[in-house]
Amino acid sequence: MLEAGGLASYDDFLACSAGEMVAQTGTSQTRRIVLHQGTRTLYAYLKQYRYLGPRWRHRFRRHKGAIEARNYELMRELARIPVPEVIAIGSRSSGLRLRDAFILTREVEGTSSLESWWSDRLKIGDVSQALRREILGEVLDLVVRMHCANFYHVDLQWRNLLIRDSIDKPRLFVLDSSRGGLRHLPWIRWHARMRDLSSLDKSARRFLSRADRARFVHEYVRATGCRESPRRLITRILADRRRKEAGG
């Protein structure tokens, strides 16, 4: 199917300009592409990395696509967290320099980001107290399993959580973890925990009450056995958000 869609070689993945551009940074761009073969259709995301000019990266340093693929595997195997399927991955070096790389992942069908899902529901007044607590319970369970396995996402914003409605209950998926990983030293875990909780609170402030957010932290401390008190942790989360908004 990849070959039929024009992705037969490494260069094809790097040169691909098909589909819709959905994200772009200084070193990467992400495209949503659709591949066809007979009656089969594949919806996927192709993230292309280019390390040119002053953006020098050593060839023996993992590129972000490789880190993301490894982290998906860790989350799935260590914490039973649903993640996208990695279809293909590759990189190319020249001398000691990493030139470019890519990762192709299958789209998680029937999902939208938690941020856009919640925003759309609010517009039509369709977020009851019961549904709010159910979703927050799912987010809490996901974060607790992740942190208890010593895995930290480091960019755990609502836009990096996918939600799929189902008959039984909503299901969450995690994506875009190119900066996280396992953390074993206590002070590194302390910092990574703050990054995750502060990132979650970035969107939570837009959609949830202070009571909802405080309840989340209290239940997180209880479930993980975190040594910090809920009050102290809430204070640090709020301070971290103020620093980030001030550009610190």
Image (cartoon, grey):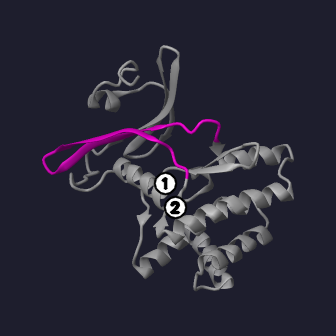
Q: Secondary structure under badge 1?
A: helix
What amino acid type is highlighted by mark number 1?
Answer: Arg
Residue extent of the magenta highlight: 82-111
Q: Please tell me how many numbered marks the rendered image carries.
A: 2
- Which residue is outermost to the left? 95
What amino acid type is highlighted by mark number 2?
Answer: Ala
Q: Secondary structure under badge 2?
A: helix
Between residue 80 and residue 4, name the one nearer to us. 80
* Corner quadrant of residue 234: bottom right
Asked if disc 1 and disc 2 are in contact, CB closer than 8 Å, the reply is yes
* Corner quadrant of residue 1: top left
Whether residue 78 is visible, yes or no, is yes
Residue that carries the numbered disc 2 in the rendered image: 79
- On screen, residue 32 above or below 68: above
Residue that carries the numbered disc 1 in the rendered image: 76
What predominant SS class does the magenta segment belong to? strand
* Residue drawn where x is 29% and y is 51% of the image: 55
Within 10 Å of disc 1 (Cα), the crowding (few <14, some 14-19, many 20+) is some
Point out residue 207 in the picture as x, y percentages from the top left corner.
Answer: 75, 58
Task: Report the side of 56 relative to 49 (left or right).
Answer: left
Between residue 238 and residue 8, name the one nearer to us. 8
